[in-house]
Amino acid sequence: MMPEPDSLAQHVVTCSADSARNLDGDITVDHGFLPRAVASPPLTGQHAAWEQVAARLPELAFAKHAQAVIADLPPLAAGPEDLPDDQVKRAATVLGLLAHSYWRFGVARMYVSRNRDIPDQLPPAIKQPWQEVCRRLGRDSAGLTLEDWVFNNVTFSRPGLVGPAGEYRVEDAVIENLRPSVPVYGNQAEQVFTSAFFEINAAATPMVRELCRLEQVMREGGPGAHEEVCRILLVAAECARRATKSFRRVSPRSDSTTFCDPVDWAKTLVTWTVPPPGYPTGPSGSATPLVHLFDALIGRTQYDSTLGVFAQELRGSQLPQKHRFFFDLVRDLDLRGYVAGLSKAAPARYAAVVEAFNEAVSAFAGDSGFLGVHKGKVVNYLGVGTIVGRNQSTAHDQTFIADATWTEMAGKLQHARDERTGLAI
């Protein structure tokens, strides 16, 4: 567990310390909310048995004997005396992948009629150590998070882009250079979709440094403070635009180098991410750090929409404690209140600050912003997915073609966007 932070800068210093490296999540100036190193080494000793089965997942995906192979793992303890601290994150990834594969693998289990029909049992050889490693990471219960599935499960396709200790440059973190370290299906849809999460959040990296600076400027004030706030807001807007550009690269066009086949995506990967009832909601785009960062920055307080309620649920089960603390501190700055106060005091003098704030809101939630593009992308992929038989989402929504529920989802996404765009000053 981490101590409650007093400031953004101090929190980043604490998170960047070597002592925090093995705790859930990461925050550093150089890598933002991404891990400071990739390509975690495989588990060693007796726990290598987990790795051996995980390496077989693509061949087991449609096999009738998948559950038998996974259930045949030896019972292994995962306490501090059994599993070193520096292997806990890797263990959470491997065990989470094995758990979801046990639930979802095999053709007969791919399209059950309802979420409640998904078998919720797990072999003790998976369930018990998974619970233990999640507790060691500070989580309330066992569940696969975006950290496990993507951030701690990414490596580079070209070895020259990764140093001997897993170090890498954020600017190299693009879809074409990335792949899952432990693939589940091994198809291109998985490679593109998971790598896109990494690239999208790479765009937010400058925000860690800039928000620490924002906190300092708002605290100290001075005659030039509003100009510095304006500059930081424009950096935030540019980060959102870069993330939007990255998201657009998840393409349904077969001639694209970042082609993500919507049929393959629906029939494999995103159905696989849905756990049975009784477990925390699985990985979702609504849990990505960039979204919660911008919600905190622009001062979102309304979570009345269906997806707003869902985002709050994900905050507790998907976001690492490090990230939750950081976003709380950003929200506590009350940047929107600060900018609105300047506008009331001297509208003409501070017009540039207001314009910069509204630009950040638009770049994040506007029609051409990150959430606007997200809406179009989700609706199109969800529509294809429903047609080919995917009947559930990470939010445990039931979707059936007779109801054309992808259009209903468009309305939900718009409602959630309205809770942000209404914050423009």
Image: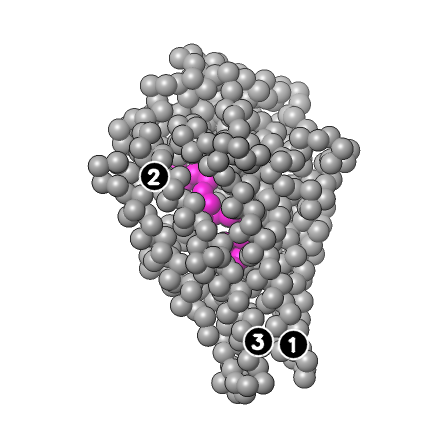
Rendered image: mark on residue 383 = 2
**Picture layout, residue 329 above or below residue 378:** below
Residue assigned mark 3 = 353
Residue assigned mark 1 = 227
Q: Where residue 11 sits in the image (x, y, percent)? A: 64, 58
Q: Residue at x 47, y 14 (%)?
A: 69
Display colour scheme? one colour
Rendered image: mark on residue 343 = none
Circle 3: is it few (<14), some (14-19), or many (20+) Cα within 10 Å? many
Asked if marks 3 and 2 touch (Cβ < 8 Å), the reply is no
Q: Which mark is first along the chain, 2 or 1? A: 1
Q: Residue at x 53, y 75 (%)?
A: 354
Q: Which mark is first along the chain, 1 or 3? A: 1
SS for callout 3: helix
The answer to whether one can see residue 23 in this image is: no
Q: Residue at x 52, y 25 (%)?
A: 187
| Image quadrant assignment for residue 76 | top right
What amino acid is labelled 3 in the image?
Val
SS for callout 2: helix
